Image (cartoon, rainbow, N blue to C red):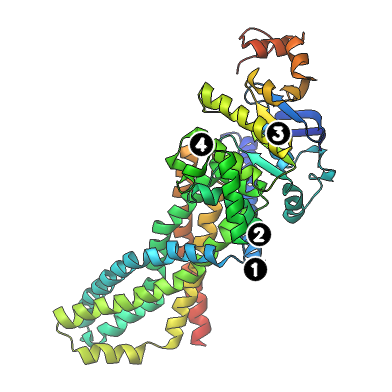
């Protein structure tokens, strides 16, 4: 933690120590990511481990993602119809819902939900394995924990996130449709036709690119925080909180840069 | 079989091991004893190659684990080790059968029928057959230690490392673990290193004993030599007195 003092020399010393500590932490985190990707690529491959994690991180998140997607789409329809009707453009409620979901809210909300649900669990699980010497036990048995624990979780995050995002988008548009057509009286044909004419493949795959990157952030941060957690229950508690906060903030920051880059790339 | 040569390790300003040397002959067992926090478990982690010493060398079966740079080179050396951890360190998500079978599965090359029969044989010799379908949290700590021992021995290691064998056990369960170590040593004939602070109980599984204090080996010899030692720290530790050269922190 950065401490400021009235003594300039002490302040510079604290600042220097803070910068060194943070640089060291960043370095360790990047090396961890490099080792995880390396472990992912090296044989032997154990499909069972990957499928188990895909079940834990992906399949078990489906219901909550669908539920959030449904209500997000419904809220977007209400808000979109209200705003667009001020300009006499409420026929465009469908594209407003679909584009908001596919380009932005789908990937971001899916990532935040998966980080909250599965990221905390991954960090806690690896953290507990660390403090109860289970990771040391793996190493003593000549099993690489990067390959056995981190690579399957990382890969599952990268694969599951776009798939969950797809479910979020489809269910979200369905939620928007129910509200816009069923409750607000928009024509079903208008809602769907406007979506198909306004939404292009560019929007869909820019959303999926984002979801894939968010999946990497999820796997990287949640595994790293678990692997480097401190001692005891407090250490695991702190690591879990840090994991959720760091990954969520990283998703939102990276989202801005990705949106800027992808919009520019695909607009050209 | 195990040779620890002039090993140094410090954490920040704290010097944990200050030029420690121990040699363990093949088939013999050495107990490393000392009060809590003197670096016994650190020594064990250095031998396993989980930590790197600041200086010094550690040989296992003639192979230097401290200079093995990559994990794969260290893993080759680790294959000759079996480790019983302080808390047994069983995998919570696996049944006791799967915990025992884990090292065989991780190494591959053994067909499932042969693996199954090997796990059953080891489980039978350690009286674990009734618990094979249970999960670690469903059995007592004493049984977990036995499972840890079965997992350590399933690959027939040349070296068995044991960290605090009877932590958290009542005296009967503690004695059972010592009996188990002796029985397994007779059956499998490994070289043993036992880390403990339990004196004189640990003498029954040791051919030699080394006591660590202040980062150094302050006394070494047979259990009889240790009992007869005139070193005041050894006597204080043996007799469990609070007055003496060992300061309680």
Q: How far apart are marks 1 and 2 (CA)?
A: 24 Å
Q: Nearer the viewer, mark 4 or mark 3?
A: 3
Per the image, label 1 sits on a secondary structure element best described as helix
Per the image, label 2 sits on a secondary structure element best described as loop
Residue nearest the observer in this picture, B192 or A250: B192
What residue would you read off at disc 4?
A: B143
Q: How far apart are marks 3 and 1 (CA)?
A: 43 Å
Residue B160 vertical position relative to residue B228 in the rendered view, above or below: below
What residue would you read off at disc 2?
A: B110
Q: Do labels 4 and 1 share a chain?
A: no
Q: Nearer the viewer, mark 4 or mark 1?
A: 4
Which mark sits nearer the N-terminus, 2 or 4? 2
Question: Which class describes the residues within 10 Å of circle 2: few (<14), some (14-19), or many (20+)?
Answer: few
Q: Do labels 2 and 4 share a chain?
A: yes
The residue depicted at 78 percent of the width and 14 percent of the height is B225
Residue nearest the observer in this picture, B234 or B247: B234
Answer with left or right where residue A100 lies relative to residue B85: left
Per the image, label 4 sits on a secondary structure element best described as helix
Mark linked to residue A41: 1
Residue B235 vertical position relative to residue A246 in the rendered view, above or below: above
């Amino acid at each position: 933690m950065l401490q400021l003092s009235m003594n300039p020399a002490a302040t510079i010393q604290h600042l220097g120590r803070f910068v060194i500590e943070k640089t060291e932490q960043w370095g360790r985190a990047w090396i961890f990511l490099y080792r995880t990707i390396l472990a992912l690529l090296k044989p032997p491959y154990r499909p069972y481990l990957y499928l188990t994690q895909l079940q834990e991180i992906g399949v078990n998140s489906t219901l909550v993602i669908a539920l959030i997607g449904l209500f997000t789409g419904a809220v977007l329809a209400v808000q979109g119809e209200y705003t667009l009707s001020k300009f006499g453009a409420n026929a465009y409620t469908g594209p407003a819902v679909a584009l908001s979901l596919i380009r932005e809210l789908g990937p971001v909300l899916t990532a935040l939900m998966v980080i909250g649900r599965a990221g905390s669990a991954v960090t806690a699980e690896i953290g507990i394995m660390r403090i109860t010497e289970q990771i040391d036990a793996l190493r003593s048995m000549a099993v690489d924990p990067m390959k056995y624990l981190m690579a399957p979780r990382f890969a599952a995050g990268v694969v599951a996130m776009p798939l969950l995002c797809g479910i979020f988008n489809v269910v979200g548009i369905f939620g928007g449709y129910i509200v816009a057509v069923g409750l607000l009286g928009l024509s079903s044909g208008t809602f769907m036709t406007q979506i198909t004419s306004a939404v292009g493949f560019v929007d869909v795959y820019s959303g999926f690119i984002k979801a894939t990157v968010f999946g990497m952030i999820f796997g990287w941060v949640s595994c790293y925080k678990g692997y480097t957690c401190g001692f005891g229950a407090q250490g695991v508690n702190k690591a879990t909180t840090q994991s959720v906060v760091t990954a969520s903030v990283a998703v939102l920051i990276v989202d801005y840069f990705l949106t800027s880059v992808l919009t520019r790339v695909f607009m050209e | 079989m195990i040779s620890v040569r002039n090993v140094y390790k410090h954490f920040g300003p704290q010097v944990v091991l200050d030029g420690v040397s121990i040699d363990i002959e093949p088939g013999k067992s050495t107990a490393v004893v000392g009060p809590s926090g003197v670096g016994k478990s650190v020594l064990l982690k250095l031998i396993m190659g989980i930590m790197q010493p600041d200086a010094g060398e550690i040989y296992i079966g003639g192979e230097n684990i401290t200079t093995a740079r990559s994990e794969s080179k260290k893993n080759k050396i680790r294959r000759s080790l079996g480790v019983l951890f302080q808390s047994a360190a069983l995998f919570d998500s696996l049944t006791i059968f799967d915990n025992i079978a884990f090292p065989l599965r991780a190494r591959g090359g053994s067909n499932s029928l042969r693996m199954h029969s090997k796990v059953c044989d080891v489980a039978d010799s350690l009286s674990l057959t009734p618990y094979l379908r249970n999960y670690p949290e469903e059995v007592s700590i004493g049984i977990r230690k036995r499972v840890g021992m079965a997992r350590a021995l399933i690959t027939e290691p040349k070296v068995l490392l044991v960290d605090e064998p009877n932590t958290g056990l009542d005296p009967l369960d503690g004695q059972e673990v010592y009996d188990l170590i002796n029985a397994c040593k007779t059956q499998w004939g490994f070289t043993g290193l036992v880390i403990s602070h339990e004196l004189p109980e640990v003498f029954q599984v040791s051919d030699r004993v080394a006591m660590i204090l202040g980062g150094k080996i302050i006394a070494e010899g047979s259990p009889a030599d240790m009992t007869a030692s005139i070193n005041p720290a050894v006597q204080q530790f043996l007799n469990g007195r609070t007055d003496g050269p060992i300061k309680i922190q």
